[in-house]
Image (cartoon, rainbow, N blue to C red):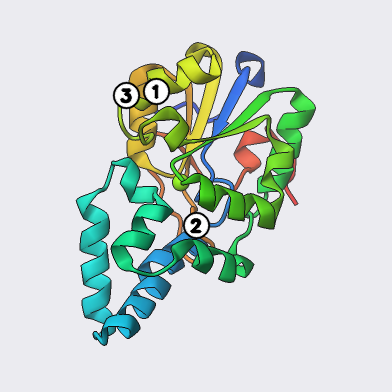
Amino acid sequence: MMPDASHLAPSTINWNEIDHVLLDMDGTLLDRHFDNFFFEEELPRRYAALHALPFEVARDRLLAMYRSVEGELAWTDLNYWTKQVGIDVVAMHKELNHMIGFLPGAEEFLRHLRRLGKHVIIVTNAHRTGVSVKVAKTGLDRYVDRIVDAFEVGYLKMRPEYWPACQRLLGFDPSRSLFMDDDEGCLTAAKAFGVARLVHSAKSSSQLPPAPLPQFFSITGFSPLLNGRRTG
Ligand SMILES: [Mg+2]
């Protein structure tokens, strides 16, 4: 008897069925090692120095502060964190911008989408101040039609309210759209809204092992989206 694979996500993309490609930024196109290092290591280190605390105490305190606003716009609002923590996190982004970079194969994938003539839009939870630092460092904006941050939409992507508001803003047809993200909650919300093709970025950081999700088309690198083309 053949195993029933009907519950599995399809493992190829028919690009003829896709008009809009909606792409997450951090952990999907850009290496999330920067963000992980920034919020889990360097900011706790500076907070510890500022308040003469052991590193572990400072980190636990910051992680609790992050969790307290998880899923809300404040979570990614760099101005909010500058006030909360008492450290200029925007200046810190600029100072550490040498750590900002593309994930392997991301630029080749973006060029491929251009050649296919797709509407390519970055949909990010990031704050516009952080987006501008990352764009200045990577030139990410030259590959895409538009970058939409969550503050323009009014919600973060893991909230059900995000998707109809984002659809009104951008005018994409969910039944002919693909969305790629490294966050399970964001993919689940997009699926509930009816975005036709969902892709999980399983390797969000160059410094962490892949973390695949079985319920999504979950990939490491972009080769599976290039239908046989090599990335390089
Ligand atoms: Mg992400």
Q: Amino acid at mark 3?
A: Glu
Q: Could you give the CA–CA distance between mark 1 and mark 2, rounded to whole angstroms?
A: 23 Å
Which residue carries the number 2 mark? 32
Q: Is residue 197 above or below residue 68?
A: above
- Image point 58% across, 47% down: which residue? 29
- Image point 34% across, 28% down: which residue? 189
Which residue carries the number 3 mark? 161
- Image point 65% across, 42% down: which residue? 223
Q: Is residue 50 above or below residue 166?
A: below
The reply to whether callout 1 and callout 2 are in contact (CB within 8 Å) is no
- Image point 30% across, 31% down: which residue? 159
Foreground residue among 146 and 208? 146
The reply to whether callout 3 and callout 1 are in contact (CB within 8 Å) is yes
Q: Residues within 10 Å of mark 3 (few under 14, many from 20)?
A: some
Foreground residue among 77 and 173? 77
- Distance from mark 2 CB to nearest ligand 1 atom below 8 Å: yes
Q: Residues within 10 Å of mark 1 (few under 14, many from 20)?
A: many
Q: Secondary structure at mark 1?
A: helix
Q: Could you give the CA–CA distance between mark 3 and mark 2, rounded to whole angstroms?
A: 25 Å
Q: Is residue 126 above or below residue 58?
A: above
Kindly identify which numbered label has been placed on residue 163: 1
Q: Could you give the CA–CA distance between mark 3 and mark 1, rounded to whole angstroms?
A: 6 Å
Label whose residue precedes the other's in the sequence (1 or 2)? 2
| Any part of residue 47 in sight | yes
- Left or right: where 84 falls relative to 123: left
Q: Position of residue 21 (x, y in %)?
A: 59, 27
